[in-house]
Each structure stands twice: as structure tokens, then as C-alpha cells.
Amino acid sequence: MACTCRSALAVFLCFSLFSLTCVAQPLAEPRSQGSTKQFPEDQPGFPQYPGAQSGSQPGTTQYPEDQPGFPQYPTSQPANQRSYRPPTAQAGGSASLNFPPDPNDSVALQCDQLADHPSDPLHVDNGVTFDKVQVDQALPVCEQAAERQPVRPRYQYLYGRVLDVAKRYPEAAAQLAAADRAGYGFASLSLGDLYSDGSGVPKNSEQALRLYLRAGNAGIADAFAAGADIYLDENPPDYAQAKSWLERAVQGGSADGNTELGWMYETGSGVNKDLAKALGMFNEAARRGSAEGMYFVGLAYYNGLGVPTDHAAACQWFIRAGSYSDPDGEMQAGFCYYNGTGVEANHETAFNWFVDAGQAGSVDARVYVADMLERGDGFNQDSAGAVQWYQAAAEQGDVYAMTELGAHLRLGKGAAWNEAVAMQWFLKAAQRGYVPAETSLAIGYENGLGQDSGQGRQDYQQAAFWFEKAANQDDGYAQLNLGVMYEKGWGVTQNLERAKQLYARAAGSSNAAVAKLGSEYFSDVPASSPPERTPTRSVASSSKDSSAFWGLVVLGALAVGVVSMLSSGGSSTSASAGPACCFSGSPGTSTPWHDADAVPDMKPTRPQLYDTQNPTRIPMGNLGDPSLATKTPWPDSN
């Protein structure tokens, strides 16, 4: 299992983009021998690592930590504060990396070529990263190599590594345990990952720490960084122990260790905040080829962390990090290409970067891919594809994606019409306080959408409940809808004064259409309860600021507006020109309707590029098809 830096780092250090909209080209492979791929830093004028000195000789880039007086790691504290505390976990015996390939066994050598760890000093060829192992090719070959007699721990480990990639965790644990007992350090590291995650074995942090210490002492410095993650993930985090493990990792040359310890100094987590130290460590991680390190160097340029703010240079580093498959780098590279920051704007390239980040699990990237597919921006218009990406993001807890998915199901756009499931998604998002979902849910209850086919029901009390929630968040359309319900006494006790108050609030909306209707409705409220009559009023739903987000249905005409970026807590922000930075969403509960893992494998094509505004989240009509909404436009007085 691959050792990666804590995902929380990206959240803590995520920059607030300047209405950036992110993403770039098809996923690039890391630089290899003979590659003609041109990376940003290979070009004339590419910004050097922060702190690079002018006038240096070609090929001798000067890094901050190389300069006289730059703090050294990890013994940069005063001598009386250097009491290094070794990790508390005890190694379960010594381990080694001296398990060489078998040059006389062609099957074994083929297994090496297909599955060797890139950090293995004895690897054949260049080694293969965890996510690049081709299971269908490596599995039968490495199984054969592992089963040959006499038993060779190297190939037990490699077979276990392939089984781990294939998610056959119990079998992987058995192979890795056998190689670990023989003293192979890489097996100790991988087995520690399984115990840390509880994959194929009971979750056991102490056992994982023992294995990480064993692997670290064998010479795998990243194992100390993996051990630090366990302490950082505790509640509350044990920063003192994490720092001890990370200092061991840094001493051993771990790029992950530099990145994570740099994060501690950047945020002041368990240590005195020290931006210079943080920058030096991010530099070192990037210099050692860490994609995450490159990403954080990009953040340093973007936020002016020890260097002058330079968004163009930041984007070059994000693209570089994305080229090495860092999901955060892929995400931000997309924004750069979408906005033309540091590179020529190219929406098709931006779309491809978003796809890469989305396939790596980024919830926001999945939303951006869905929005661009829905609009045909950077890729051919594809509502069915958009629904799949919205579904994937909705399953991760993104309230905007839940609402968009519900809207598509209500419309039967890109998916079979299903009002019942649409209402389930609206409810999930509404329960998190997302205003467009609250109004969409209320509209469904008010009009009984789908009741003719047994998929919905008319419930004025529920409609009034959800309109009230949205109206209390200054949603103009909800105020209009709720005012009508109070005027007519639908689901609430008739109250003309309350209706006028709601209309007056809507009349103050910044949305001219909402304000106009609010004024008209206010003036039209009778002094006393009127005789029953067939109303002609019909209004729509909005987001947090009704004036800025949703279209209005007047006499059955549906007009669509824009919706803003949303936060992980389920709130919406003001309208923006495009997607904002950073990461939202929390684990959601799945429904049987769709497999959350079924993210489409989008392959780039060469559609005509679209010269449009920055991507914005555009609702497809929360009210559903106007023909559905007008079947029972307003309830009878009975």
C-alpha cells in the first residue's frame, strides 16, 4: 500500500483562489529516461524553488537550506531542547533490504519488472508505483515466483504487494507476513499499512507502529513518516510523538517526512510556527521528487509563503505536481488552465485535469467535470455522463451534487425520471441546510410531483416547513412561496399579515424579478380573507441569496440562473464566476440507485473548444419539468 502524506494537509494549506477555476491536460507520466515530455521547470525562465539564488552556476541550483545560517533539520533547536525522544513502539526484531532478485529465474525477474517497489535499491528496471501495478499481468507471474521452492521472501513480498493492489487483503497479509518473518523490510512496511488501515487484518495501530519501526530501521525512511501519520490521526493528535517519528524520517531522507514536518511548522501544530522551516522542508521534498512537495511549493508561491506572491509560478508547480499524479496538483492545474494563469487558457485541457483529479477521488473535481459535461464546456455535452459524476460526488456528501442529481432525476435528464429518488437526494441535502435543496424539496411536497405514479405526495405542512427554513435564510423565492401559503392557508393557519411580511421581504430582493413579484403580491393581499379563487401565482426556488441564483417560473416558463460554490458544511456562498479552491463534502450514505464507485473512465477527445465564462454550477431546474409542475399548479381550497 502506498505511503502518502496526510490528506488533511491539502485542506489546511488549500489556497483561496482568485476566482480561479482549475484544471489541465491528460495525465502525464513522471519523467523517464529518454522522455521528450517538457516539464515547466525545464523551460527557460521557469521559477526556481523558493529561495533559489541568482547567479548560480547551471545545474547547481541553490536551495535555502544550503545557505549559511539556514536552520538545519531536525536538530535546529537549541541544544537544551534537542532531547530526541525515540518512538515508543519497539521493533519486533531486525529487518533488512538485502533480498536481491534471482538472476537465474526468468519468471522471478518478470515479477520484479512488473511489481518492484521504486524505492527498492535492488529493483529491476525503474520499479512500479503502487497505483501503476498491472494486476492482470503481475498476479499470475508473481504467484508462480512466490510458490517456487525454496521459498524466497522477496517474491512472497512482491506477490503480496500485487494482492494488495488487487484488494485481496487477507491473502496479501498472509504473503507479507511470511516475508516479514524472514526479515524483509519492504514486507514489514506493507504489512504495517494493512494493520494501520485494518485491511485483511484487524486494525491494530500498535502492531502497525512496530512494523513501521522495523521497516524504518531497515533503511526505509518513509516508514517513519507512516508511523507519524498514526499519531497525527489520533484524537487529539499526539504531535510530540509525530514530530519524533518525522524527524527520524527527515534524517533518513524521506520526502514525505519533509512534507509532513513542514506542514507542522507551517501551521504551528505541536511546534512553534516557523514559515522559513516549512518552506525549506517543502523545498527539500520537491527536490527529492515528491509530488506533494511540488504542490506545497506551488502553495508557497500562491500564498507568498517566504517568497513573493506569484500565481503564474504557483500554477507551474501545480502542473508539475499533477504530472506526477498528485490529486491536489491535478485539481489546481485544472483551475490554472481554465483561467489561463501561467499558461494559455484551454478548457479542454482543464477538463482532462479535472477528470484525473476526480478519478483520484476529489469530490470538487467530480462536480466540475459534471458541470462541464452538462454545459459541453471543454468536452462534448453529455447529460448522462454528468449524472454519473454528480452521483459520485453526491455519495461523498457534496450537497450541491445531491441537489443537481435530484434535479436531473426530477427532469429525467441524463437519467430515467424518478421523482421518489430525487426527493431522497433533496432531503439529504436539505437536512444539511442547503437552501436550493430545501426549496426543491418544498416544491415537490407543495405540488405533489410524481403522485400520479405513486412516487410523490402532496403535503402542504411539509412544504411550508421547508419553505420556512429557506425563507429564514433570506431566500426570496421561498419567501414568495411561503407568503402564498399563508395567504391561502395551505398547510399553515391563514395569516394575511404574515403573508404581507414575507412579500415585503421578497420585495427587497436584489433580484428584480423577485422584487417585482414581491411588490405585486404585497399590493394584491386583500384586507380580509378573500373568497376562494383559483390563484395564478407560481414561483421557483433559489439558493442562499434568491436574487443571485435560481430562475423563476412565471406562468409555466422556466428560466435558469447560477448556483454558487458550497462548503463541506452544506452552506452556500455568494455567486462567483467559477469554482472556488479547496475541498468540500463529507462521507454520505449511499442509496441502491447507483454505485458510487462507478466513475466513468473518461478518455480525452478533441471536441471544439468553448470560449465561455468560468465554470459555474448551473441548476437544471429544481422545479422539474414545467409540464409536471403545472399538472396541479396550486392546490384547491379544499
Image (spheres, helix red, strand yellow):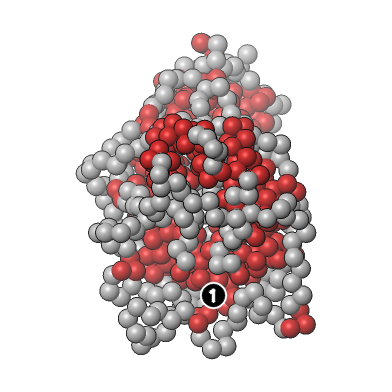
Quadrant assignment, res 84 = bottom right
> Can residue 63 be spotted in the picture?
yes
Question: Which residue is more in the foreground, 595 or 467?
Answer: 595
Question: Which residue is more in the foreground, 32 or 7?
Answer: 32
Find residue 597 and report its horizontal and vertical position in percent: 50, 32
Find residue 33 and report its horizontal and vertical position in percent: 30, 59
Identify which amino acid the numbered label 1 is placed on: Gly
**Extreme top residue here?**
453
Find residue 517 and report its horizontal and vertical position in percent: 49, 39
Quadrant assignment, res 85 = bottom right
Image quarter hosting the N terminus? top right
Image quarter hosting the C terminus? top right
Q: Residue at x 41, y 24 (%)?
A: 415
Question: Which residue is more in the foreground, 143 or 486?
Answer: 143
- The answer to whether 95 appears left or right of 576 in the picture is right
Q: Residue at x 53, y 51 (%)?
A: 99
Question: Which residue is more in the foreground, 442 or 90?
Answer: 90
> Which residue is under mark 1?
280
